[in-house]
Structure formats: C-alpha cells, structure tokens
Image (cartoon, helix red, strand yellow):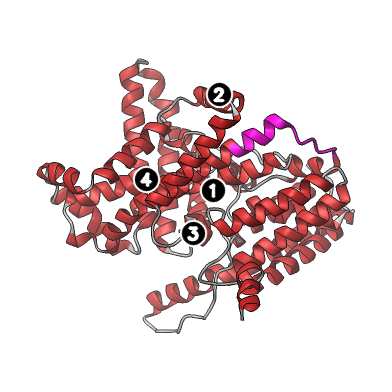
Amino acid sequence: MIWSNIWETLLGFNAKAPLLFNSGQFLLYFIIVLSVYAAIYRNNLSRTIFLLGFSLFFYYKSSGVFVLLLIATLILVYILTRIMHGMKDKRQKKIMLGVTVTAALGFLAYYKYTNFFIESVNALSGREIGAADIFLPVGISFYTFQLLSYVIDVYRGDVAPEKDFLNYAFYISFFPQLVAGPIVRASLFLPQLKSKIKLDKVDIQRGFFLIMMGLFKKAVLADYIAQYNDIIFANPGNYSGFENLMAIYGYTLQIYCDFSGYSDIAIGIGLMMGFDLGINFNKPYQATSITDFWRRWHISLSSWLRDYLYIPLGGNRKGKYRTYINLFITMLLGGLWHGASWKFVVWGGLHGLGLAFDKMWTKYISPHLPKSIFRTIISWFVTFHFVIFLWIFFRAKDFKTAWLMITRVFNEMDWAYLQPFWSVRQLFVIVLLVGFAIHAIPSKLFPKMEKLYINSHFILKALAFIVLFQLIIQLKSANVQPFIYFQF
C-alpha cells in the first residue's frame, strides 16, 4: 500500500494535483534532473535524450494521457514539414503548407473551440445542442503556436528543417516553456542544440536569481492577492464599488506576477541548463501607449502575432485603413487564442481598436503636441487604466459579471470605504503596493540587482532563499495554485 502511494505520487498522474513549478514535488524532480544533467550535458545525444524524456514525463505529470496527443502531433508535423520542404513546385509547396498548418491547428481547434462553436450556434439558433465532454490539454495553445512558427519558418526558408527528430521534438517540448511559454523560435533554440553547452557559473546564478524572482512573484504576490480577488469576482454585486476597484487593481498585479513569474522560472531553468529562451516581459505597466504595452507584455506571443498574422495580412503596407483593420483582426484572433469565449474576443478586439487608435494618434496628432514630463505621465495613466479596464473582461466569468463590476465601480464608488478597508485588509494593501512598487523599478536597475546577487556571499544567497521560502509558507493559500495561463 505504501509503495503504491509512492508510485502514484512520484510517477502517476493526478488530475487534481498536476505537476507545477511552484510545488515541492517539482523541486524534488528538478534537483534529480540537475544532478543527472551535470554529469551528461557535454554529450549532445545523451543530453537531448535525457531532457526530452523528462520533458515528456513532465507533460504527463501535468496532463496525463494527453502526452500521447503531444507525441502524435510532433510526429505528424515533423513528417509533413519534411515533405513540404522537399517539394520543388511552389504551388504544391503552398498547398502542403496549408495541410501542415491545418493538421497542427486541427487538434487545437477540436479541444479548445468545439464547445465554443456549439454554444455560439445555440445562441444564434435558439436551439440547445449539448456540450461535448472535452478536456483542454495543458499548454496546447503554446506548443501549437511554436509548431506553427517552425513550419512557417521552414516554408519561408528562414530555417532549415531539422533532420534529427530528437532535436526537433526536444525543441518543441523542452519542459520549462512547454505548458505556458515563452513561445521560442527555432532560429534561436535549434542552433543551441548543436553547439557545445557551457554551464557558466554566472549564468547558473542568473538562472537561480530569476527562479527566485519568479517564485516571489507567483507564490508570494500573485497567489496571496488572488485570495481576495477571487472572492470579489465571484459575486461583485455583494461588494461596494471601492472593493470592486481594489479587486480590479489586484487582478492587474496578479496576472502580471502570475504569468511573468512563470516566464522568469522557465527562463531561469533554461539558463541553469545552458539554454537561452529569450525574454517574455519587460515592465509592461510602465508602457506609455498600447503599442508600447504589447512590445512589453508576453513578448513571444505579440511578436508571433506580428510576424505570422499581422505582416502576412498586409501589415502597414496597404494603406492606413488596411493597417487599422489588420491590427484589429490580429488582436481579435489573439483574444480568441487566449480563450474560447466571446469575452476574450471582445478583450482582443478592444485591444486591436486601441492599437489602431494609437497608430492614428502617433501619426496625426502626437507630432503637433509639445513633449513634456506631464504629457508622459498622462500617456502612462491613460494606457495603464485602459489595460486595467480590459482585464475586467479577461477575468470575469461572463459579460454580465464584467458589466456588474464596471457599474459598481462607477455608480457605487464611496471613498469612505478606504479607512475600514485598510483596517480589515492591511496585508492585501501592503502586498499590492509592494508588487506595484517593484514593477515601477526602472529596467536598467534590474541588471545591477542581478549582479549584486551574483557577487554576494553564499551565506547571503542562502539567507535570501530562506526568507523567500518563509514568505511563501506564511502567505500561501490552502492548495498550490496553478498558473493562470495553464488554462490557455
């Protein structure tokens, strides 16, 4: 009985407790993996086989039997891409591109959008077709987009098709970025697999610093703030406009800390193993325009949408009106990528309108306005609150809940709640202010903080880790909280 429990915990899949970066179980696995990796990393084949094997095991612990879907998708796209690359006729090659892209998107479309389609048909027709019993595999949106970037880059001739299936499969399924990004380009990652990996002491410490930063963002800031946010978003009508506003600000910090925290951990793990996964966030709430925001937020996705959707649609090459339409369509589809719901479509569409307006403002109005610190502050304030406003639709369970929150904030706002709120929710306010204060630190100071950590004595590094560990224990909720973007 004891051995069966150990097997279930360490090697089995538990849908109620999937393997997460911020869990003690993952820490145990990671220590084992690093220990083995340190002994074999100089041998390219051994390194690839070992990390590919663990990556598939990691996905199994996160999604169970859907690891077979991942493997099937990898094999299918690999074969189709090789066939496409070998074709000489341009027309046939383009048709084969369509077949390969359709094959990769087909799994995503079925698992993510079948019930969305059924619900939309029901709403339009007034009929009641029952929803299909479909479970969304973790990370399918991320690895599908990574596969698509690889296929399209091969078609364009930007990268050569990877002949070694193991290298190709490892590139797509490398465990740190498999389930929630970053979406890594083949041109960045595949050359690293063929070069000699050097486990540089500085990079290892940089990686560990990023992991600590990610855990602090996720397990301390995001998870604690979420406890209050979840209460308000569940039933905003029971709370005042001020309390709703605090939940909206809270979610604004929560989603940033949750998602950028995951990215920090993923990138940090990659660095500790000698791999560069790029950058995924760059102080997005410091943006002074919507265009600037999308250059800083989820950079791997926004650049993907630009290179594989916006530019192929025509980008800004076909006149100003087509530029605005292309921006709108790109973000509309970007919203649909985030979730199979009309509220995500609206969220993306409004961001598209914001980008189109920003493009028009920058070209026709901004050049005629004097530059000043006051103008910069106003631009930041408007951008920040536009993003915050749209997060309401992103988080709320439906349009009714989102609209109820908005009306409570604008119609039921009473600043008299400020003092009693502080009395009851002091720690929430402190954590919220600390989170935004950290985000406000200029980007140029981060390398200095990183260098200070790297150059510090081992005892100070250990002390920092102990303090972080204690904060996680003191502020954690009852269960380990999954990352928000796991649902996409």
Mark 1 secondary-structure assignment: helix
Residue 488 in sight in this render: no
Look at the picture and state if 57 lies above or below 322.
below
Q: Residue 94 at x, y = what percent?
A: 77, 56
Q: Residue 125 at x, y = what percent?
A: 40, 79
Which tag, 1 or 4, sits closer to the chain's start?
Answer: 4
Q: Give the magenta-colored segment's residue range.
A: 195-208
Q: State the residue position of label 2.
A: 452
Image marks 1 and 2: residues in contact by CB distance under 8 Å: no
Mark 4 secondary-structure assignment: helix
Which tag, 4 or 3, sits closer to the chain's start?
Answer: 4
Q: Is residue 148 left or right of residue 424?
A: right
Image marks 2 and 3: residues in contact by CB distance under 8 Å: no
Classed neighbour count for the residue bearing mark 1: other residues with Cα under 10 Å, few (<14), some (14–19), many (≥20):
many
Type of residue at label 2? Leu
Q: State the residue position of label 4.
A: 252
Type of residue at label 4? Thr
- Which image quadrant for residue 143? bottom right
| Mark in front: 4 vs 3 | 3
Q: State the residue position of label 3.
A: 482
Classed neighbour count for the residue bearing mark 3: other residues with Cα under 10 Å, few (<14), some (14–19), many (≥20):
some
Q: Quick check: is 270 in the magenta stretch?
A: no
The foreground one among 410 and 358 is 410
Q: What is the spatial separation of the Cα atoms under label 1 and label 3, in whole angstroms?
A: 10 Å
Which tag, 1 or 3, sits closer to the chain's start?
Answer: 1
| Mark in front: 1 vs 2 | 2
Which tag, 4 or 2, sits closer to the chain's start?
Answer: 4
Q: Which mark is residue 262?
A: 1
| Mark in front: 1 vs 4 | 1
